[in-house]
Image (cartoon, rainbow, N blue to C red):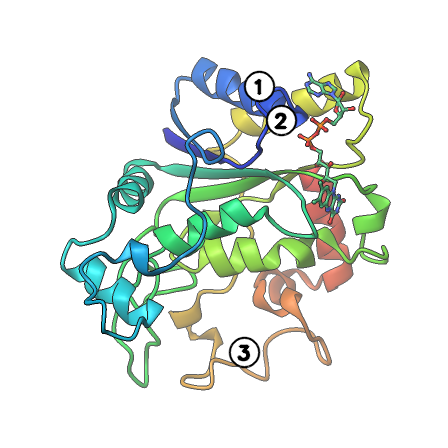
């Protein structure tokens, strides 16, 4: 497979830098072709502003969605953004790697998403009608490709369990896995999460590294998170609500958008535990 790893840590000698090297080495040993976007090293510009749209007249009000749409349609995106889009189209597999900062991705990576996910490429794709609501959530420009997260966290695994004070890791990562990766079509593999990493010793590092190698060895065979397809019949259009007969009675929240529970009779808590275990 062709693998694009987007790396968001400012220090190459960090734990993240070491885990990135472990991942790349294992991927190459498996015969995969790897490219890396190292956002800090490359001086990635994280914020969307007028400078992203040089063809926008100076007296025109800047509307980011409209400017993005026009730039994508007319081939006027800046070279750095165009280059990242080309890499996404090249890759069969996208990996986003980052330390968990304030329960999410570092700002530089969020800015990569905001700028690279142009209108007409990652959103605003496909027809809107009373049967379809665009090509998104399982459909879109990146459908047929796979994606996953590699995340390090200072908190303990228990802190991110279903009853943990930080909130379940599946919920915290849902906006990224579902909202950023599944949205333009990726099949999203369960994340690799290394917990309690601050002060990690050599043995702890080797344990995490081996778990990561195993995940890199099984990229092709790992089952994606079973998110529901938006246009697959599970949602009412145009309200985009899950049909009332689906999901567990009384259930709310992110787990409703997984379609394994209806078949397997699992509770969302059980499912989340399984996914956290899968991420270990
Ligand atoms: P580093 O600091 O580089 O290393 C971590 C440890 O790994 C060090 O002790 C290092 O010696 C050791 N190590 C062992 N072997 C190696 C090796 N071979 N190479 C390199 N290092 C090794 N945590 C949360 O859980 N939730 C949050 O919301 C959160 N928010 C944060 C916000 C900010 C702004 C910051 C700075 C931190 C936050 N943290 C949070 C903690 C953060 O997630 C961790 O500090 C981070 O994941 C550690 O990754 P690192 O690559 O920076 O590790």
Residue 67 against residue 209 in the figure, above or below: below
Q: Which label lies toward us, 3 or 1?
A: 1
Mark 3 sits on what residue? 242
Q: Which residue is mark 1?
A: 22
The answer to whether the residue labelled 1 contacts the one labelled 2, judged by CB atoms less than 8 Å apart, is yes
**Image-quadrant location for residue 153:** top right
In the image, which disc is placed on residue 212?
A: 2
The alpha-carbon separation of the residues under discs 3 and 1 comes to 40 Å
113, 275: nearer the viewer? 113
SS type, badge 2: helix
Q: Is residue 23 visible?
A: yes
Q: Which numbered mark, 1 or 2, is in the foreground of this view?
A: 1
Quarter the C terminus occupies: top right
33 sits left or right of 280 in the view: left
171 sits left or right of 85 in the view: right
Q: In front of the other: label 2 or label 3?
A: 2
Identify whether 171 is placed above or below 237.
above
Q: Is residue 143 left or right of residue 268?
A: left
Residue 177, given in percent of the width and then of the height, sits at: 54, 53
Name above or below for residue 42 compared with residue 114. above
Q: Dot 2, crowdedness within 10 Å: few (<14), some or many (≥20)?
A: many
Q: Residue 145 in the image: state x and y as whole percent.
A: 37, 44
Image location of residue 20, percent across then percent down: 55, 25
Task: State the separation of the CA atoms marked 1 and 2.
Answer: 8 Å
The answer to whether the residue labelled 2 contacts the one labelled 3, judged by CB atoms less than 8 Å apart, is no
Q: Which quadrant of the frame does ligand 1 lie within?
A: top right
* Residue 21, quarter of the rendered image: top right
Label located before the other in sequence (3 or 1): 1
Instruction: Residue at 59%, 48% (x, y): give it.
Output: 105
Quadrant where the N terminus is found in the figure: top left
13 or 249, which is in the foreground? Answer: 13
Q: Residue furthest front?
A: 59
């Amino acid at each position: 497979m062709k693998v694009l790893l987007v790396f968001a840590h400012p220090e190459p000698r960090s734990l993240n830098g070491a885990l990135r090297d472990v991942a790349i080495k294992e991927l190459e040993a498996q015969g995969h072709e790897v490219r890396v976007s190292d956002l800090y090293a490359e001086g990635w510009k994280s914020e969307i502003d007028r400078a992203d749209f040089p063809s926008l007249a100076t007296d025109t009000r800047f509307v980011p969605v409209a400017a993005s749409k026009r730039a994508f349609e007319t081939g006027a995106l800046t070279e750095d953004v165009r280059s990242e889009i080309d890499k996404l189209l090249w890759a069969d597999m996208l990996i986003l790697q980052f330390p968990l900062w304030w329960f999410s991705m570092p700002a530089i990576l969020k800015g990569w998403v905001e700028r690279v996910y142009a209108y007409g490429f990652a959103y605003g794709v496909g027809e809107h009608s009373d049967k379809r609501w665009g090509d998104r959530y399982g459909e879109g420009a990146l459908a047929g490709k796979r994606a996953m997260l590699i995340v390090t966290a200072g908190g303990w695994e228990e802190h991110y369990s279903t009853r943990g004070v930080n909130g379940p890791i599946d919920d915290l990562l849902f906006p990224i896995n579902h909202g950023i990766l599944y949205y333009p079509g990726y099949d999203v593999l369960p994340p690799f999460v290394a917990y309690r990493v601050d002060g990690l010793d050599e043995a702890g590092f080797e344990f995490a590294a081996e778990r990561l190698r195993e995940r890199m060895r099984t990229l092709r065979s790992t089952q994606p998170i079973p998110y529901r397809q938006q246009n697959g019949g599970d949602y009412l259009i145009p309200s985009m609500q899950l049909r009332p007969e689906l999901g567990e009675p009384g259930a709310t929240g992110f787990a409703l958008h997984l379609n394994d529970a209806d078949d397997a009779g699992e509770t969302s808590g059980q499912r989340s535990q399984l996914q956290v275990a899968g991420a270990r």
